[in-house]
Image: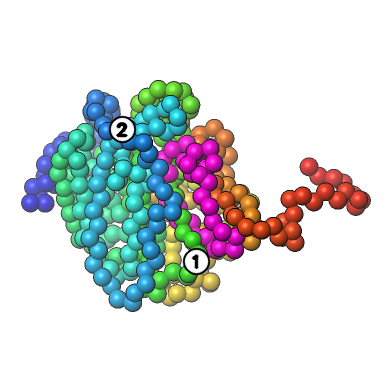
Amino acid sequence: MFETTRRRAMQALGIGGAATVAGCSTKAPTAAETEAQRQQVEQTSTPTVGQVAADPTDVPEPIDRSQPTTHEVTLSVEEVTAEIEPGVTFDYMTFDGQVPGPMIRVRQGDTVDLTVESPSGNALPHNVDLHAVYGTGGGAAATTVAPGEENAMRFRAEYPGAFIYHCAVPNLDMHISAGMFGMILVEPEGGLPEVDRELYFGQHEVYTDGEAGQEGKHSFDMNAMKNENPTYVLLNGEKYAWAAANRGPIEVQQGERVRVFMVDGGPNLSSNFHPIGNVWSRAYRDGGLPENGDFEAYADKNIQTMKVPPGSCMIGEMETPVPERIKLVDHALSRVARRGMLAEVDVLGDEREEVFDPDAHDTSHEGPQYA
């Protein structure tokens, strides 16, 4: 059954029985094929939804067991129309209708039975490449589905860390840019250190034929993507999705240790991920986690800005000793000011003037004054 589904999907992709790399044809799609795919999306009536921005607080519970188990996971590949910002609509491609796709959380040694479903109203084939998988294309070839079909595979999570998953059909850069990426977290056998709160974010850039803020429906611009000139750079799929200007800020309590999971879908830009007004007190570059349980020795300490390449992840922890508004940004700051890359976290609690005094105004001391 599944081999038949794969064959149909490959035929729909126009690659027949050709060898594949990461689920893609070894021959890159021509400009005409790429434009045909873009037009196919444009001409298909996709459902309009009110929100694609994934809730950062929607994080699976930490693993609390000592033995491996088997998970049944289903991802639905959904093509939807939504607003990037008020008055600006765009045709997204998503996992489960959200950006980033749902966070999958398993333990090293667990087995995952993964099913990929594609509603019949979709225009294009899709699949999923998980960087946590040993296997051709990270499972992309095994999970390719045409509209109206499903496909499945089984894998065992052999190595710990936070890993991206993403669509990997031809024109995969378009699919990822339009929202088809997420994170799979493989906890080491001993689990992660306990924290008080966990949040989940995904960065990506979107290439359209309009200017940022230009009202109306924006179409995907292949040339802008080729030239790596995005219209928007987004955190969770919408301009300022979880900032006070939109659906935020997210609230945490003073004194909580907050763990942030972040995946950079790209497809092209690295992130310079920084919490303004805070620091990554413990940071795990590229989502790497120790197998021996020595997190203190493994983690980087007090990192101001974490470089996250496209196709990679980071895990960072923040301490919250004072009430404040933390701004999560890409410190390539034009992406914040001009292209929508911002989330905000409000720390609620009582002032601690010995740590930070926002009302200090003693000017009696000598010496230069600084703005």
Q: Amino acid at mark 2?
A: Thr
Give me the C-alpha separation between circle 2 and circle 1. Answer: 37 Å
Label at residue 157: none
- Image coordinates of residue 143 in percent, x first then y, are 20, 50
Check the image and report above or below for 37 versus 203: above
Secondary element at tag 2? loop
In this view, the residue in front, 239 or 176, is 239
Secondary element at tag 1? loop
In this view, the residue in front, 213 or 303, is 213
- Image coordinates of residue 76 in percent, x first then y, are 24, 47
- Image coordinates of residue 349 in percent, x first then y, are 62, 57
In this view, the residue in front, 317 or 109, is 317
**Which residues fall within the magenta stretch?**
236-263
Label at residue 48: 2
By secondary structure, the bulk of the magenta-drawn segment is best described as loop
Check the image and report above or below for 241 versus 364: above
Kindly indicate whether the residue at mark 1 contacts the one at mark 2 (C-beta within 8 angstroms): no
Q: Is residue 246 magenta?
A: yes
Q: How is the image coloured?
A: rainbow
Q: Is residue 243 magenta?
A: yes
Q: Amino acid at mark 1?
A: Val
Identify which residue is drawn at 36% across, 64% down.
186
The residue that disc 1 covers is 195
Left or right of 348: which side holds 250? left
